[in-house]
Image (tube, rainbow, N blue to C red):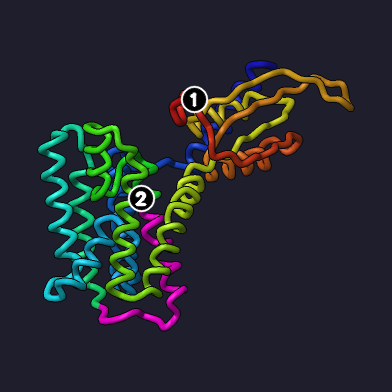
Amino acid sequence: MNVKVNLNSQDIMAKVRRELAPDRLPDKIRFFVLLNAGLFLTAVGIQLFKTPNHFAFGGTSGLSIVLARLFPNLPVSAFMWILNLVLVGLGFLFLGARSMGWTIYSSIALSFFVSLCEIAFPLSGPMTSDTFLELCFAVILPAIGSAIVFNIGASTGGTDIVAMILNKYTSIEVGRALMLSDLGIVLAAAVLFGPQVGLYSILGMVLKSTVVDSAIESLNLRKVCTVVTRDPEPVRDFIVQVLNRSATEETAVGAYSREPTYVLMTVLTRRQAALLRDFLRRHDSHSFITIVNSSEIIGKGFRAF
């Protein structure tokens, strides 16, 4: 009887593997693609929404918008190149290339993408007459881009280099120092572009951190799945062999039937949870599953302590 169950389980796993046929990119390529996608989204937000409305939320993009007003012969991308190259030079001087890692690439790539967007999407003014709508997209696009970059363990460069230098050589609280510098840029925008732009910039600066945190939480969202079944082997094999995850298994007793059963608990991505649910529906319809959202999974195989 046990041999028959094992053969059935193996047949099911072979069939499922043929159906799913995983085709993931190698981790390094995936990292590079996500990094550039995040930087490009940030650049699109800068060119299409921040620059035409003079929204200076801080950072190198905000300072570049202010400088472009003071020196109108140069576009925003030119000042981003200048500022980011200067910051990369300071990073080399005070931190060394090894300490900066991908921050060097991010600083240069973001400047390149902003220049590319200026060529691809030339704008002489805002796309719409609704300033608040433009503000929403000026916040959301760079926030999502930054969240993607932060979530893979990289940074968007720019003022992050200043933060790294301050953290290494001074006792200044980095977060407060960067907040004060961003506030200074916002005040400069208010003086140059008027109080309305200044107030929108303050609102954007506040919203940006909130949206970035929410976006990172959404990217980190995982599904805690608990499966109750009388035939745990196919479920266990599917989780381990097909989804490449692990699970915790324990024996239990049905409160109503008093018959022995098994409980498997695992943590999956949204797609994996959907695959597990579909697997149970097709191959173990007498089982049931509970799925709970969680964005804080800490431990081996997930976020480090």
Q: Is residue 34 left or right of residue 304?
A: left
The spot of residue 42 in percent (x, y) is 32, 59
Q: Verify whether residue 248 appears in magenta.
A: no
Q: Amino acid at mark 1?
A: Gly
The spot of residue 187 in percent (x, y) is 33, 64
**Labels 1 and 2 touching (C-beta < 8 A):** no
Residue occupying the point 19% across, 58% down: 111
Does any portion of residue 24 appear in the rendered image? Answer: no
Q: Amino acid at mark 2?
A: Met
Q: How many marks overall?
A: 2
For numbered disc 2, what is the local secondary structure?
helix
Against 278, is 287 above or below? above
As drawn, the label of residue 179 is 2
Q: Verify whether residue 139 appears in magenta.
A: yes
Q: Is residue 81 left or right of residue 262?
A: left
Mark 1 crowd level (few <14, some 14–19, many ≥20, 10 Å Cα): few
Q: State whether the magenta stretch is mostly helix, strand or loop.
A: helix
Q: Which residue is mark 1?
A: 299
Residue occupying the point 17% across, 32% down: 98
For numbered disc 1, what is the local secondary structure?
loop
Q: Which residues are magenta?
A: 123-146
The foreground one among 219 and 186 is 186
The spot of residue 22 in percent (x, y) is 42, 41
